[in-house]
Image (tube, rainbow, N blue to C red):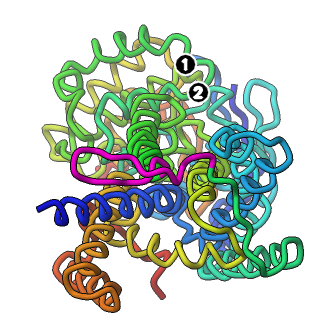
Amino acid sequence: MLTLENIHAGYGATTILQDVSLHVTAGEVVTIVGANGAGKTTTLRTIAGLIRPSSGKITFEGEDITKLSAHETVELGVTLIPEGRQLFSDMTVLENLLMGSYRKAARAAQHDTLDYVLSLFPRVKERLAQNAGSLSGGEQQMVAIARGMMAKPKLLMFDEPSLGLAPIIVQQVFEVIDTIVKTGATVLIVEQNVFHTLKAADRGYVLENGEIVLTDDAEALLSNDHVRQAYLGI
Amino acid sequence: METFLQVLANGLMLGALFAIVSIGLTLIFGIVKVVNFAHGEFLMIGMYLTFVVTGWLGIHPLYTIVIVAPLLFLAGAATQRFIIQPLMSARDDHIQIFATVGLSTALINLALLIFGADIANTPSGGLRTPVEIGPVRVLSGQLFILIAAIALVIGLRLFLQKTQTGRAIRAVAQNRAAAQLMGINVNRIYVLTFGIGAACVGLAATLIAPLYPTSPNIGTYFVLTAFVVVVLGGLGSIGGAFVGAMVIGLIDSFSGFYIGSDLREVAVFGVFLLILILKPSGLFGKSLNLSHVSP
């Protein structure tokens, strides 16, 4: 479904990703594991079209999306739930969710999708009329995930969904992601909580200093010595 | 008492005039984050267009709205697409401001070239006829301006709150990167918004042209007050611009009558400074991030 071939990318003159190749097959849950600054967020932002790679090729469903802008990538069905939630804080929760289905393919089914998404997020439903900025961090993350699902994406990307949240809220966020995974969604997830994410994922890539150093089934990575030492602290 | 009411009415009419000129300016600032120093010249172009179209077609000046507003929309959209947008990636945001100053100068000189320095009088179409409302008299054209200003504020508000495109415009203003991640073409939203802002001032021009003589410098006459109104109302706030305009209009009118007409501007700018000292973000402004306009 998604393929990255030999991607080099970064900000300005700073190259962060070095020769990154990875793929995600339809229905898979894939995770990218790595330390802070390894290039996980850069990878997701490059796929989303927020950063244009300096070389390499990205294809989605056979189409070359390397040079597409972010809004064009969204139209094809790739949605990124960004790090730090990035809600429209002066707009209501409902308005945030409606913006999620701005994508043409999602707009016609807006109301059905809304009903479905709200059934997954009863807490969000109680807050529909409130300004998104007035919610707690955990609630905002739920809205951000719900907003991402409103796009009816073919590929859903999560960037650090549990960052900065209290442990009990983190648990709730993971439950929600597990629910989404069970619906058969195709997911690419970057998450500091490596143990939990590998448990939920089918496959994983290990990214170090902008390079993929290891890739395997999630189960195999969980028992891999390097992963256990570097990321699981075992 | 009658005099007081008349001065009050004059202030409201003046306020409505400032409001209708300012709404487009504050919209563009609030969304595109560009201070458009050519705003007054858009008004000037609109007034000349009203003058020309009225003369050519021999129609009532108000009917020219259907021609002038769309033309100004195109002028605004083109300004954003071909002047501002290429400069958006520039390291220094001030370059966009300089570009609009340059556009302003160019348009004034273009008008001088085409129409000369003489004033052009658009037919009043009966809009300078006094109307009596109870004890006060105002011009019918002034009433139209008040009605149009109120309709514009309400219309824009409904558009921004209730339509998908309107929500997209607000989303872009609040979080540009997140808006892109929703599938919103940010550049297109900027072009659209600049066009709408310019169309608003086109509407204003068709209402003002029958009441005021048109000259190449007419824009500068109105736009200084428009900037005061926009800052006073809270940068980017449409309702705030309306209230700010009314405040300025009333101060102008009352100080002109009760203090002395020479001191009107002293009063207006004195109150303006006072409000800014007490509430720097303006009457209805949120504490805006002004990193893009400050050094």
Displayed quadrant of residue A9: bottom right
In the rendered structure, find residue A107 and report the number of the disc placed on it. Answer: 1
Where on the picture, by quarter, is residue A193?
A: top left
Q: Which residue occupies 20% across, 75% down?
A: B279
**Label 2 sits on what residue type?**
Arg
Determine the residue positioned at 38% across, 64% down: B14
Say whether residue A195 is left or right of residue B38.
left
CA gap between label 1 and label 2 equals 6 Å
Subunit bearing disc 1: A
Decide if residue A116 is on the left or right side of residue B62: left
Magenta range: B125-141
Q: Position of residue A184 (x, y in %)?
A: 48, 13
x, y percentage for residue B287?
Answer: 27, 67
Q: Which residue is mark 2?
A: A103
Q: Badge 1, how many Cα within 10 Å: few under 14, some, many 20+?
A: some
* Above-or-below relation of B93 to B65: below
Amino acid on which disc 1 is placed: Arg
Contact check, label 1 and label 2, Cβ < 8 Å: yes
User: Callout 2: helix, strand or loop?
Assistant: loop
Give a yes or no on whether discs 1 and 2 share a subunit: yes
Q: Is residue B146 left or right of residue B109?
A: left
Q: Is residue B128 magenta?
A: yes
Name the residue furthest right: B114
Residue B184, image x, y percentages: 59, 39
Quadrant of the image occupied by residue A120:
top left
* A95 within the magenta span: no
Q: Which residue shows up at 38% across the image and 66% down it?
A: B235
Question: Mark 1 falls on what kind of element?
Answer: helix
Can residue A50 be seen here?
Answer: no
User: Which residue occupies 69% across, 31% down?
Assistant: A2
